[in-house]
Amino acid sequence: MFITFEGPEGSGKTSQLPALVDYLEGLGFQVVSTREPGGTAISDQIREVLTSMKNQELHPRTEILLFLAARAQLVEQVIKPALQAGKIVFCDRYGDSTLAYQGYGHGLDLTILRQMLDFATDHLQPDLTLFLDLDVEIGLARKKKASEWNRLDAYALAFHKRVREGYHQLIAEEPERWVTVDATQDMKTVQANLRKTILKKLKSTHLLP
């Protein structure tokens, strides 16, 4: 099963993943957890370019091509082999981030972006996408407090609001794949809600009795 995690900056996706991996491994599942951009030696090098505050002049078209290059490598080197081996794969961000950030955020053509995503991922789609939602002002404040600020975080507030609105539009278009979790709650409550959602999905696909 391929499960992706999406959300505005500072929504807590990355913080929640280790406990989810431990929980499912405790149930007997083999789990691979990765992230975007990154997850391979090549993709991690691309991540450095994308997130560096030195690269403020990076054009949105250049940005999308770099994201797609990192994603293509991750899919072929990590995600596909893990799924073929019968493992559960968690990915912190995936193709929906491209539609939300470069599509709705930057205003690039969504039809073209979807075609590019299909090429980069070889049409690999998640079975479940968990959206950790919160107001962008709260999320950005969290990131500043944690000293995790990068080039993408530094975009204008209006950009981040367009991204969040874009996510809501994507969810409305494909509600059967998405589950929204309130990320303003405390970490234990969010973790409990994530576990409950994942278990429900595993049972619906008969991976759990």
Image (spheres, rainbow, N blue to C red):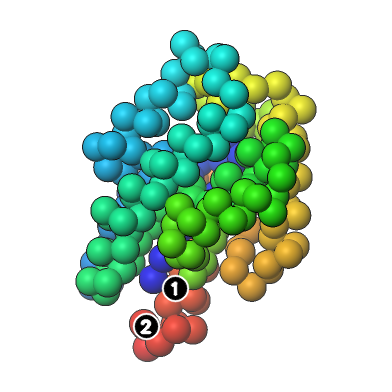
Q: Nearer the viewer, residue 141 or 40?
A: 40
- Element type at marker 2? loop
- Mark 1: amino acid: Leu
Q: Are marks 2 and 1 in contact (CB under 8 Å)?
A: yes
Q: Earlier in the sequence, mark 2 or mark 1?
A: 1
* Residue 57 visible, this angle: yes
Q: Quadrant of the C terminus?
A: bottom left
Q: Quadrant of the N terminus?
A: bottom left
Answer left or right for 111 relative to 54. Answer: right
Residue under label 2: 208
CA distance separating discs 2 and 1: 8 Å
Residue drawn at the location 53% of the way across and 31% of the way down:
63
State left or right for residue 91 relative to residue 27.
right
Residue 87 coordinates in the image, percent (x, y): 28, 69
Camera-side residue of 172 and 106: 106
Type of amino acid under label 2: Leu
